[in-house]
Image (cartoon, rainbow, N blue to C red):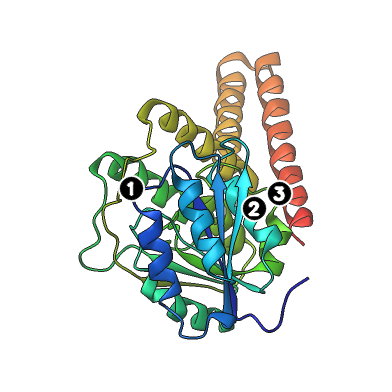
């Protein structure tokens, strides 16, 4: 159930952010002069430092600050889904607790979301500071996702965005528990033709220690590419492969006719393989379209 008296709900996932979380909450609370217009939901995702104690102080001081806990670390996406389920406003804003995003822009994104299903703060404005370690995979992933969505996506995984709760709940079953939450919801919106707006914002270096783990996150990056492509655009992923198979069938058929004068089992098997692959791609596309209605 949503509360019509609230303009929006802010969800902040938080894991071991004792160095930045107080500054972030102060910044968010200062954005609106009337605290009754929004609620701030902070999800403590099993923090092992003093994050929980800091958050409990804010919850005790402010009536519109609500603290949710995970007994163990479940992931960025899991924290957002916990917050989405508890949010009482139709418009949901998300941001990070590490001081990287210009949270003073949130009211602007909320206002723009009245005419869109999602508004994303795209980290493309002058002065945005990116991690060099993440630049290469982000470059490839951005182009891959843009190809799947059939449109340019300026920022695929920005953690500062506003979207409608009713729409997000439709996709919540496919949204992952990890950092690929933002990538997945971006593709879900765009491939289902939901009005989405990208607004340029700045981005600062995080306060505190990064959660990036190169080896583990590289494996997750590869899995994300395979999963998102297969789920959101099966025809675009499988049809180049199917086209190659049919080309091999034609080449094999020409060779059989010209050099052997007879159709061989190899050509028949290639044709059956190509036909099955094509039918599988069409079936996957039909299932995708029906599940997103």
Q: Is residue 183 above or below residue 247?
A: below
Quadrant location, the N terminus = bottom right
Give the numbered dot on residue 81: 2
Look at the numbered disc 1 and give the secondary structure of its residue: helix
Q: Residue visible at 20% across and 64% down? A: 127
- The Cα–Cα distance between marks 2 and 1, rounded to whole angstroms, is 27 Å
Asked whether, in this view, residue 218 is left or right of residue 282, the answer is left
Q: Residues within 10 Å of mark 3 (few under 14, many from 20)?
A: some
Quadrant location, the C terminus = bottom right
Which sits in the foreground, 42 or 130?
A: 42
Residue linked to disc 3: 285
Q: Is residue 119 above or below residue 261?
A: below
Q: Residue visible at 61% across and 41% down? A: 230
* Coordinates of residue 42 in the picture (x, y in percent): 54, 57
Q: Is residue 178 above or below residue 269?
A: below
Q: Which of the 4 quarters of the picture holds residue 263?
A: top right
Q: Nearer the viewer, mark 2 or mark 1?
A: 2
Asked whether, in this view, residue 43 is left or right of residue 54, the answer is right
Residue linked to disc 1: 139
Which sits in the foreground, 55 or 176?
A: 55
Q: Earlier in the sequence, mark 3 or mark 1?
A: 1
* Coordinates of residue 284 in the picture (x, y in percent): 72, 43
Does the residue at mark 2 contact the one at mark 3 (Cβ under 8 Å)? no
Asked whether, in this view, residue 217 is left or right of residue 38, the answer is left
Look at the numbered disc 2 and give the secondary structure of its residue: helix
Which sits in the foreground, 182 or 95?
A: 95
Does the residue at mark 2 contact the one at mark 1 (Cβ under 8 Å)? no
Q: Earlier in the sequence, mark 2 or mark 3?
A: 2
- The Cα–Cα distance between marks 3 and 1, rounded to whole angstroms, is 27 Å
Which sits in the foreground, 220 or 82?
A: 82
Q: Residue visible at 30% across and 64% down? A: 124
Give the numbered dot on residue 52: none
């Amino acid at each position: 159930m949503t509360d019509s008296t609230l303009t929006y709900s802010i969800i902040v996932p938080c894991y071991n952010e004792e160095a930045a979380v107080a500054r972030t909450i102060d910044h968010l609370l200062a954005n609106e002069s009337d605290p009754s217009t929004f609620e701030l939901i902070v999800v403590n995702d099993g923090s092992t430092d003093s994050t929980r104690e800091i958050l409990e102080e804010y919850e005790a001081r402010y009536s519109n600050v609500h603290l949710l806990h995970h007994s163990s670390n479940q992931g960025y996406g899991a924290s957002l889904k916990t917050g989405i389920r508890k949010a009482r406003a139709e418009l949901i804003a998300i941001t990070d607790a590490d001081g990287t995003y210009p949270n003073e822009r949130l009211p602007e994104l909320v206002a723009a979301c009245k005419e869109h299903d999602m508004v994303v703060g795209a980290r493309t404005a002058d002065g945005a500071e990116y991690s060099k370690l993440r630049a290469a995979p982000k470059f490839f992933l951005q182009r891959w996702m843009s190809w799947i969505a059939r449109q340019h996506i300026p920022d695929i995984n920005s953690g500062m965005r506003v979207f409608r709760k009713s729409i997000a709940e439709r996709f919540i079953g496919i949204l992952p528990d990890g950092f690929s939450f933002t990538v997945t919801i971006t593709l879900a919106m765009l491939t289902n033709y939901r009005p989405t707006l990208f607004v340029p914002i700045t981005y600062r270096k995080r306060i505190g220690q990064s959660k990036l783990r190169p080896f583990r996150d590289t494996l997750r990056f590869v899995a994300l590419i395979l999963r998102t492509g297969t789920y959101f655009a099966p025809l675009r992923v499988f049809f180049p492969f199917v086209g190659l198979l049919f080309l091999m069938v034609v080449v094999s058929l020409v060779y059989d006719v010209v050099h052997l004068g007879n159709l061989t089992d190899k050509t028949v098997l290639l044709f059956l393989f190509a036909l099955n692959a094509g039918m599988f791609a069409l079936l996957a596309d039909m299932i995708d379209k029906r599940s997103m209605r």
